[in-house]
């Protein structure tokens, strides 16, 4: 690519802008739905402790490695990996980690947009009072009807993808940065409001107990592996996202501090989401560990029974929509950067092309919820005998592509990047730098391999 192109590549306007954008990517369904429910199933506080350790020891170091590659290369993720490898006299084939990441981002966005569409449709349902005073059956039917209607799903999928293309096509400062600076604080405020409302249910103490009282008798090897997998997913690692975002990061900003900031924000939102959701669950005697239904059936049911329920249900689903929106933006960014530079296209053209391609693939996921619900592409394997298209794409990306990409990046930065130049870029004290590098060289690969093998078994 040409020098003019490189020179015109903007920078985040501050460290905070980068942190908010990266946190916008990190904060999503993983925090608001998955974390609370996994915590409940895995012994509460004990799981939280292990999870926090995984964020600190695996999540933050890999995030730093990805941001380093992006900032050092200052190109799209694939080109950055190649350039950094060449600079360090390593095999340019290491860029396979970024290729897997960009591909994973593309596939994930195709179905993430469908689920983002559910959130958008739930904002509507809540606002017009569809949940008010309804019983479990009626609320369940609203969800069931949504999944059964390809036309309605397609409509919301299109709306959601349109919102994402709109932001990404506007580029760094007026697109990504402005969206993160507005949506993230709004999300925090909405979350705090819902938590405040949750304290009025009379079951807040029970929720606190549920989330923070460690019960080590429930902790198994499996718990630790789940906590590790969740740390990976929740911080948006292995998708080349942090490489893409790092490519706009100024040299004067500390990568370590930024990564710690993102880790803290992501964790905070996960904990607050638990405090927002469980008081309602307990107040209504509902089942805590029940998966997707927790957000799309149980919670609307709870809100439907409460005073001001319409207002808070709407606030909650707007919050969910914002979280999904900023995550969706981050998924389109690495793909767009790659298309933009690879085919020398305009930013807008690249965003539209990538977005429309994702949108098309998303239609397969939509159909797998209804018309194609018995299409099992890998049905010949026992394990996937009843895995539909959406679930299959989810499985292949989350359990194979992400850990593989993250593992390769950790190995590359830990073993192939020259120590001096790495230390130069990271600008950390000797002690912290060596700790980080050793985590990447030894601890991260072993831990990721463990998750990887476990997931495949
Ligand atoms: N990190 C997001 C979450 O916790 C999930 C996500 C995955 C976001 C992939 C973007 C890309 O929900
Ligand atoms: Na997250």
Image (cartoon, helix red, strand yellow):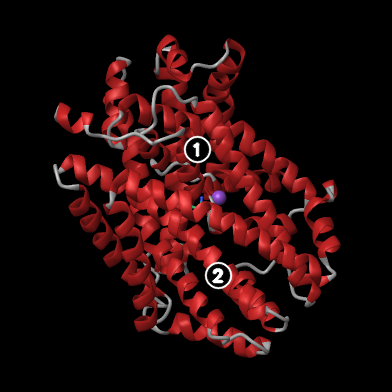
Name the residue rendered at 43%, 71% in the picture. 117
Foreground residue among 386 and 415: 415
Name the residue rendered at 46%, 67% in the picture. 115
- Quadrant housing residue 156: bottom left
- Quadrant housing residue 325: bottom left
Foreground residue among 94 and 354: 354
Name the residue rendered at 51%, 76% in the picture. 122
Judged by depth in the image, the label closer to the viewer, 1 or 2, is: 1
Foreground residue among 58 and 184: 184
- Where residue 119 appears, x then y in whole percent? 49, 70
Mark on residue 317? 2
Q: Is residue 31 left or right of residue 151?
A: right
Q: Taking the image as drawn, is residue 91 in sight? A: no
Q: On screen, 213 above or below 362?
A: above
How many residues crowd mark 2 within 10 Å: few (<14), some (14–19), many (20+)? Answer: many
How many residues crowd mark 1 within 10 Å: few (<14), some (14–19), many (20+)? Answer: some
Name the residue rendered at 18%, 33% in the picture. 5
Whether disc 1's CB lies below 8 Å from ligand 2 is answered no
Q: Taking the image as drawn, is residue 298 in sight? A: yes
Distance from disc 1 to disc 2, alpha carbons, whole Å, reads 26 Å
Helix, strand or loop status at disc 2 = helix
First-in-chain label (1 vs 2): 1
Query: Which residue is the site of mark 1?
Result: 16
Q: On screen, 286 above or below 187?
A: below
Q: Is residue 88 left or right of residue 356?
A: right
Q: Is residue 211 left or right of residue 252?
A: right
Mark on residue 312? none
- Quadrant housing residue 390: bottom left
- Where residue 312 appears, x then y in whole percent? 64, 73
Q: On screen, 117 above or below 39?
A: below
């Amino acid at each position: 690519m040409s020098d003019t192109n490189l020179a015109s590549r903007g920078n985040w306007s501050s460290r905070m802008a980068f942190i908010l954008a990266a946190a916008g990517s990190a904060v999503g369904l993983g925090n608001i739905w998955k974390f609370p429910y996994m915590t409940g199933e895995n012994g509460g506080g004990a799981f939280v402790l292990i999870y926090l350790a995984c964020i600190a020891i695996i999540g933050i170091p890999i995030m730093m490695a990805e941001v380093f590659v992006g900032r050092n290369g200052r190109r799209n993720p694939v080109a950055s990996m190649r350039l950094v490898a060449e600079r360090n006299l390593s095999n340019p084939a290491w860029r396979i980690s970024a290729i897997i990441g960009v591909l994973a981002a593309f596939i994930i966005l195709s179905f993430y947009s469908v689920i983002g569409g559910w959130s958008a449709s739930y904002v509507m349902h809540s606002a017009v009072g569809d949940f008010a005073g309804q019983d479990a059956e009626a609320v369940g039917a609203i969800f069931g009807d949504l999944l059964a209607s390809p036309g309605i799903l397609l409509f919301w999928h299109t709306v959601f993808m349109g919102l994402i293309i709109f932001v990404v096509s506007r580029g760094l400062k007026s697109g990504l940065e402005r969206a993160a600076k507005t949506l993230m604080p709004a999300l925090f405020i909405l979350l705090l409001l819902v938590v405040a409302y949750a304290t009025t249910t009379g079951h807040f103490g029970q929720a606190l107990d549920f989330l923070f009282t460690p019960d080590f008798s429930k902790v198994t090897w499996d718990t630790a592996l789940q906590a590790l997998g969740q740390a990976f997913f929740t911080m948006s690692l292995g998708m080349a996202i942090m490489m893409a975002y790092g490519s706009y990061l100024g040299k004067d900003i500390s990568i370590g501090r930024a990564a710690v900031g993102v880790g803290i924000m992501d964790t905070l939102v996960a904990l607050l989401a638990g405090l927002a959701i469980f008081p309602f669950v307990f107040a209504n005697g509902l089942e805590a560990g029940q998966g997707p239904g927790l957000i799309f059936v149980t919670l609307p049911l709870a809100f439907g029974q409460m005073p001001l329920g319409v207002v808070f249900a709407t606030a909650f689903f707007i919050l969910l929509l914002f979280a999904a929106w900023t995550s969706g933006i981050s998924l389109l960014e690495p793909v767009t950067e790659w298309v933009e530079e690879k085919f020398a296209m305009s930013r807008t053209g690249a965003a539209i092309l990538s977005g429309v391609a994702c949108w098309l693939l998303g239609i397969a996921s939509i159909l797998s919820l209804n018309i194609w619900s018995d299409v099992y592409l890998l049905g010949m394997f026992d394990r996937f005998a009843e895995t539909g298209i959406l679930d299959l794409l989810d499985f292949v990306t989350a359990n194979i592509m992400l850990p593989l990409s993250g593992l390769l990046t950790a190995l590359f930065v830990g073993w192939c990047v020259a120590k001096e130049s790495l230390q130069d870029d990271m600008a950390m004290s000797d002690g912290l730098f060596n700790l980080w590098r050793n985590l990447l060289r030894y601890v991260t690969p072993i831990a990721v391999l463990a998750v990887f093998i476990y997931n495949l078994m």
